[in-house]
Amino acid sequence: MTLLIIIIVLALIFDYINGFHDAANAIATVVATKVLTPFQAVLWAAFFNFLAYWVFGFGVADTVAKTAHTMEINLVVILAGVIAAICWNLLTWWLGIPSSSSHTLIGGFAGAAVAHAIAVHGFSGYIGEDGTTHYWYEIVSWYKSGKDGGMPSGVIIIIAFIVLAPLVGMIASYLISIWLLNASRKSIGPKIFTIALMILTVWFVYSQMVPYDKIGKPRFDSHFWSVAFDPHNIKWFLVAFIVLTVSAFCLIFSSLSLHQADGALKKMQLLSSAAFSLGHGGNDSQKVMGIIAAAVAVYINTNPGVHMNSWLDVVLPNEDMGVKGVMPGWIPLACYSAIAAGTLSGGWKIVKTMGSKITKVTSFEGVAAETAGALTLYFTEHLKIPVSTTHTITGSIIGVGLTKRVSAVRWGVTVSLIWAWVLTIPISALLAGVVYFILSVFI
């Protein structure tokens, strides 16, 4: 039990570090454009990081918890993974490199699990409980097809989104920028497009709503408030609110003076940065929830018959067996509090890289980048894919830079960032493997 408590404490410390390591993702553009002072910006971002507790479910947490097969690992594996993730996060923060805290944690967990499998079984095959031959690399959940044709999961999908998340963010921010640029012109075409987009958004969001009779645990007696405040529905309401707000601005953009347009864009940056901070809190806090859930599951597996206190009564969902997950309320509350506290601590080294070194950012670019980043995070969270908020916002900033000219993006800095992204998972995995072997000598 002592080791389990240590893992939970270290996981929350990692969540805190994640907050100040990734604070720049949400606040870099509002600081760069002087919409908010640095102190105001971290307060703003921290508030919405914590507010995500009431918005998002636990889909990403489930994906992270199942990075490795919990029936085949022990607590030392998770401890090694968390220690390696903390070390790499602190190093990259010190060097001012906006690497992915998400991929650090995934890489550490997977690397320690593989080291454990090699230590126990070696490189040769072994007979598992199901009577078939297994190999050391199978301890990690590399790929699992989606149920009923849904989105597949596994480490390979997470690795794929190292490329896909910033690419989606870049394309989305580029398109939003083009949309805003055309809306500034006094012609009827952009307004017709905007009205059509508003109608399409309302229709799409309405089609995604979960009705009252399909809500598992309604939060209120009232049908209306239960539907309105269901986490799944809140997320889609936010998507509609963001798109409709930008659309409303586009309809009046051409009638505004340059001064009025700049003032309106700065106010909209508050909305876009808040939306991104919500996505950051919801996406990144869930990864720590997943690690804590996996640690409890491993503890129960390695101590059969143990009686767990209600505050540690965690059950991982299993769609194949029809088992619904159980997560005590204190775990998400602690995770969201830790990441909000971390964001409040800032992370100014990375703010400089994100806010100015990639491309010069104005209020116009800030709105486009943060809106694109927020929408990307909401959709990937909906698909239960743990993506990097760092990669997403970096891709979005590159996208708005491309609307000016290709040379507006400082590609030397960008290539250096991409190398950091590519190396994060393998380095974290190797570091976790080394930490695992060291810990195994003492534990």
Image (spheres, grey):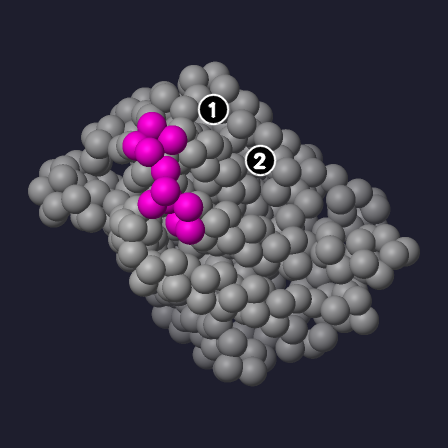
Classify mark 1: residues with Cα within 10 Å, few (<14), some (14-19) or many (20+).
many
SS of the residue at dot 1?
helix
Q: Which mark is residue 48?
A: 2
Residue positioned 83% across, 45% down in the render? 309
Closer-to-camera residue (348/143): 348
| Residue 149 is at least partly visible in this image | yes
- Residue 138: in sight, yes or no? no
- Residue at 81% from the left image edge and 58% from the top image edge: 224
Compared to 344, does 287 lie above or below?
Answer: below
In the figure, 95 relative to 137: above or below?
above
Is residue 217 positioned above or below 97 on the image? below
Q: Position of residue 228 (x, y in %)?
A: 73, 55
Amino acid type indicated by mark 1: Ala
Q: Which mark is residue 41?
A: 1
Q: Residue at x 70, y 67 (%)?
A: 210
Q: Residue 8, how many percent across, how many down?
A: 63, 37
**Magenta span of residues:** 250-260
Q: Is residue 432 left or right of residue 401?
A: right
Q: Label 2 neighbourhood size at 10 Å, few (<14), some (14-19), many (20+)?
A: many
Foreground residue among 68 and 77: 68
Q: Residue at x 90, y 56 (%)?
A: 221
Quarter of the rendering containing residue 110: bottom left
The C terminus sits in image quarter: top right
Amino acid type for the residue under numbered disc 2: Phe
